[in-house]
Amino acid sequence: MKATDKISDKLIKDFSPITLEVKDESYLHAGHAGAPKGGESHFHVKMVSAIFEGQSRVQRQKMVHQSLKEDLATYIHALSLELKTPSEAE
């Protein structure tokens, strides 16, 4: 299973997102420290979820980091996040 699919599966389970996009951006970091050959280490996530209502940007990021805790400890070297509520996404 691809890393993007693993990440997507966890986020779908934990956040029931309205929209979710997980992009592998490892190619942008080829040759940098922490970028393994073959990629699947640097990701960008765009997600819209009602679960984020009433949560600050930092709280939202902490929620996602908790969801992906094991992945961040193993294969995810970098993770950038765009996390919105449905009203913010309109």
Image: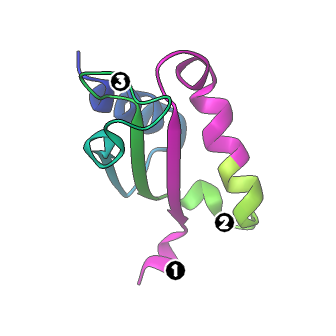
Q: Which label sits in the foreground, 3 or 1? A: 3
Residue 33 on image: x %, y %: 49, 32
State the mark number for residue 31: none
Residue type at mark 2: give it. Glu
Q: Is mark 2 on a helix, strand or loop?
A: loop
Relative horizontal placement of residue 9, taking residue 15 as reference (left or right):
left
Q: Is mark 3 on a helix, strand or loop?
A: helix
Residue type at mark 3: give it. Lys
State the mark number for residue 87: 1
**Badge 1, how many Cα within 10 Å: few under 14, some, many 20+?**
few
Residue 57 within the magenta-colored segment of the rendering: no
Q: Is mark 1 on a helix, strand or loop?
A: helix
Q: Disc 2 and disc 1: Cα gap in Å?
A: 9 Å
Quarter of the figure with residue 6: top left
Residue 69 within the magenta-colored segment of the rendering: yes
Residues drawn in magenta:
62-90
The residue under the point 66% across, 51% down is: 61
The residue under the point 72% across, 45% down is: 62
Q: Earlier in the sequence, mark 3 or mark 1?
A: 3
Q: Which of 39 and 14 is in front in this view?
A: 39
Residue 71 on image: x %, y %: 52, 21
The residue carrying mark 3 is 6
Residue type at mark 1: give it. Ser
Asked if the residue at tag 1 contacts the one at tag 2, i.e. Cβ–Cβ closer than 8 Å, the answer is yes
Q: Which label sits in the foreground, 3 or 2? A: 3
Residue 27 on image: x %, y %: 25, 42
Indicate whether 14 appears above or below 46.
above
Asked if the residue at tag 1 contacts the one at tag 3, i.e. Cβ–Cβ closer than 8 Å, the answer is no
Asked if the residue at tag 2 contacts the one at tag 3, i.e. Cβ–Cβ closer than 8 Å, the answer is no
Quarter of the figure with residue 69: top right
Residue 83 on image: x %, y %: 54, 61
The residue carrying mark 2 is 53
